[in-house]
Image (tube, rainbow, N blue to C red):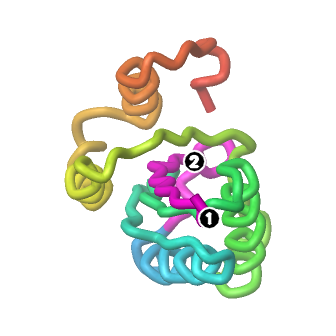
Amino acid sequence: MTQSFTQNLQHIIFSTKSRDNWIDASWEKDLYSYIGGILKRIDSKLLAAGGIPDHIHLLTSINKNLTVPDVVRKIKSSSTNWIKREIRNKRSFAWQNGYAAFSVSNSKVDQVRNYIKRQRYHHKKMNFEEELKLFLDRYAIPYDERYIRG
């Protein structure tokens, strides 16, 4: 083949530092729009975004020349700067260091998109730790309980 063909769909989840309730409904849509712009600038796409005050979920299509850690690092650093600059009383905002990323089959995009859009509903039934464990178990990813807690 003379060209490379890839599809790198990722469901990315990360939380605020110490899982504090930093993200307010009054500006979360602006945050997701800003993250969409970050991804566009690196030739990637935001397909869906959602969350609650202590964490966010992103469904992304990542450029074939980029790695997931590089993309997450770029999203976190740029969005942190934006929040500190644009959102009143958020100068000490920070994301937690880690993240979770799960590959998504094209046939599951609509299902993941719907899951992400219904975050407020899901979290009436389970907290972030329970949700994360559910994903880690579903994807058979081993984990240490110490790193699941905030």
Q: Earlier in the sequence, mark 1 or mark 2?
A: 1
Amino acid type at circle 2 is Phe
Residue holding disc 1: 2
Task: Please tell me whether mark 1 sits on a helix, a strand or a loop.
Answer: loop
Residue 129 at x, y percent in the picture:
46, 29
Q: Residues within 10 Å of mark 2 (few under 14, many from 20)?
A: many
Q: Magenta residues?
A: 1-23
Q: Quadrant of residue 128?
A: top left
Near-viewer residue (55 or 74): 74
Q: Is residue 120 visible?
A: no
Q: Residue at x 68, y 72 (%)?
A: 79
Locate residue 86, reporting x and y percent. Answer: 68, 87
> Does any portion of residue 83 appear in the rendered image?
yes
Q: Which callout, 1 or 2, points to the residue nearer the camera?
A: 1
Kind of residue indicated by mark 1: Thr
Report the front residue among 38 and 16. Answer: 38
From the image, tell me which residue sits under label 2.
Answer: 14
Q: Is residue 102 left or right of residue 17?
A: left
Q: Is residue 134 magenta?
A: no
| Image x and y of residue 131, in percent | 38, 32
Q: Quadrant of the N terminus?
A: bottom right
SS type, badge 2: strand
